[in-house]
Structure formats: C-alpha cells, structure tokens
Amino acid sequence: MKHFLLIAFCASTLTAVAPAMTEAAQIKRACLASDRAAATRQRCGCIQGVADQVLTRKDQKTVARWFTDPHEAQEFKMSKSARDDALWERYQAFGQVALASCG
C-alpha cells in the first residue's frame, strides 16, 4: 500500500509539473529552430538563461513567436499601447543583457 501511495504521489506531482516543463525554454527552442548560423546549443542556452532572469514566462512566450514572425515584433514596437511599450522595453533590456552575456 505504501508503494502505491508513493507512486500515486509521484504521478500527481509529475502531472502538475509537466505543463510548466513544456513551457520552459521557449526562447531556446525558438532560437535553435531559427535559420541563424550563430544559433548554437550553447548560445541559445545562454540566451534562455538571460530570458529566465529578465522576462516573465508570458513575455518569453510572446518573444519566442517573434523568432518565426518578426513582423509581430515590429507591430509591438510600433504599438501605442502602454502594455506593449512596457514589453518592448523589457525585450530591449533582454537583448542588451543577452548580447553582453552571450556574445
């Protein structure tokens, strides 16, 4: 019975954590999927580390889409919304830190 309870506990814990794990490393995956020659595993991992420090998960989800749709990034940049402006400022700060840290 103890083994059953332990397995049930582990399974429920894993199920609760799994969605968060699939959302993690969105920037790294988008970076690796890009056609950029400089998109190495090491560099994309470094960029993801900076993203984890500077951007929220929601920001990361949005920014990851910009790797495949740069036009969406341009729309954010040109937006007059205070929310979009705030994200753009965080994105610029992220870019500066990533450039300094990851080269």
Image (tube, grey):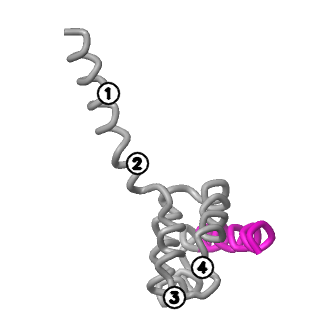
Give the residue number, with chain letter if any, for mark 1: 10
Instruction: Tell me which segment is drawn in magenta.
Output: 85-103
**Which element carries disc 1, helix, strand or loop?**
helix
Residues at marks 1 and 4, CA–CA distance in whole angstroms? 36 Å
Q: Residue at the location (27% across, 31% down)? A: 11
Q: Which amino acid does the dot numbered 2 rest on? A: Ala
Question: Percent position (x, y) of residue 44?
Answer: 60, 70
Q: Nearer the viewer, residue 26 or 92?
A: 26
**Residue 39 - label:** 4
Nearer-N-terminus badge (1/4): 1
Tell me, yes or no, whether the two marked residues, 3 and 4, touch with CB atoms within 8 Å. yes
**Which element carries disc 3, helix, strand or loop?**
loop
**Residue 20 - label:** 2
**Which element carries disc 4, helix, strand or loop?**
loop
Nearer-N-terminus badge (3/1): 1
Q: Residue at the location (50% across, 83% down)? A: 34
Q: Which amino acid does the dot numbered 3 rest on? A: Asp
Tag in front: 1 or 2: 1
Q: Which amino acid does the dot numbered 1 rest on? A: Cys
Question: Percent position (x, y) of residue 9?
Answer: 29, 23
Give the residue number, with chain letter if any, for mark 3: 35
Residues at marks 1 and 2, CA–CA distance in whole angstroms? 16 Å
Check the image and report above or below for 83 versus 9: below
Q: Which amino acid does the dot numbered 4 rest on? A: Ala
Question: Percent position (x, y) of residue 33?
Answer: 46, 78
Q: Main secondary structure of the magenta part?
A: helix
